Amino acid sequence: MNVIVRAPNWIGDAIMSFPFIKSLILEKNIDKVFIFARPNIASIYELLDEKKVSIISEIGKFAFLKNRKIIPKNIDIAFVLTPTFPATLPFFLRRIKNIYGLYSSENRIFLKNGINTKKRSFKKTHLLNSYLELLKLAGFKIKNRIPKLKINKEILNKFGLKENDYFVIAPGAKYGQTKRWSYKNYAILSQNIINKTKLRCIILGGSEDNEIARKISTIQPNILNLTGKTTIKDLFSVMAYSKFTVSNDSGLMHISYITGTKTYAIFGSTSPLWTEPIQNGTIFYSHRDCSPCFKRKCKYGHYGCLTDINPDEVFNKIIGDLK
């Protein structure tokens, strides 16, 4: 039996699907697991050290006929992990009869069975559990395990780093301001940790995080800024050998914990119930009445869900764990 999985479009969501992929790998009657993903997301799945897995990069969001042609013909079951029309249509056009997935009004018609993402309860359970539930709908057993990853320790030499000699901060979040803890808080926290532990501080993120990193570095110059300077493979390796990571609810948070690194996660407008670290994580969340709102900007303008989280609180927890 051959199975294909349409990967999510966000880094964090893709990483939360890793145990789902591992469950398929462990199924004895499945010969091959194809993962169909956007090119930037495909590079994440390429780090899976699993022989049963084969990666296919999507040609284009609306290139339905071209995408249909690059999907293998001998597919028995398809899983769609993003509830959109463009993500689902190529599998329907490939005449795959058994399509399971997350759905909205866009793609429900194409699915044999699935999970409604528009229900209020959807974001009150962890996204990983929703992925695993799709396995049950398709008649498979759930084996919630982390797959093997291709982590290269030699990459540390590229940046002059040594294992467990540094910690990582990830102050960005593509989703929006409601996910970003203040750069001043990150600067204060970093300064306190450096003074207490003598560890180096590394800032990770994309090129869009350069300005945030610059502001932090202005306050605390003893920081190595690697924003916009790393590949996906670099990120996995640098985080894997970090002492710990402090991050907003972002793709980097998910990369951190999936490598086994202790991860301190700052949550604002989003819900830990839905996307908290699935291993080795500590959550900082204010539990305001207005949170989670899942908005990109605070409709009240105060961003209290983030300002309620004090850098001293985070610092004390980290130092306590290090003792």
Image (cartoon, rainbow, N blue to C red):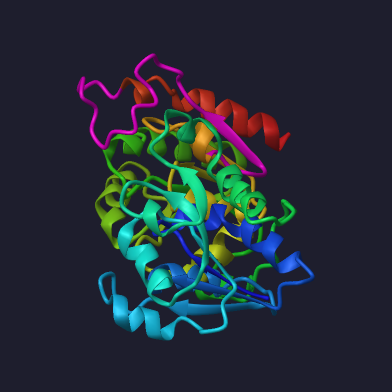
Residue 57 falls left or right of residue 228: right
In the image, 66: left or right of 4?
left
Name the residue at the right extreme: 28
Q: Quadrant of the N terminus?
A: bottom right
Q: Is residue 298 above or below residue 30?
A: above
Q: Quadrant of residue 249?
A: top left
Which is more toward the observer, 42 or 95?
95
The residue lying at 28 percent from left, 51 percent from top is 214
The x and y percentages for residue 138 are 63, 56
Going 47% across and 68% down the picture, which residue do you hit?
A: 232
Q: Quadrant of residue 248?
A: top left
Of 251 and 61, the residue lying toward us: 61
**Residue at 27% over, 57% down:** 208
Indicate the position of residue 204 as horizontal and vertical percent values.
43, 56
Q: In which quarter of the image is the C terminus?
A: top right
Instruction: Give the extent of the magenta segment.
Output: 276-303
At horizontal 43% and vertical 67% (from top left) the residue drawn is 41
Identify the main secondary structure in magenta: loop
| Magenta segment includes 283 | yes
Q: Can residue 159 be seen in this view?
A: no
Determine if residue 291 is in view. yes
Residue 170 colored in magenta in the image: no
In percent of width and height, residue 56 lies at 47, 79
For this orientation, the residue located farthest to the top is 289
| 302 left or right of 235 in image | left
Q: Is residue 95 above or below residue 240?
A: below
Q: In the image, is residue 152 above or below residue 84?
A: below
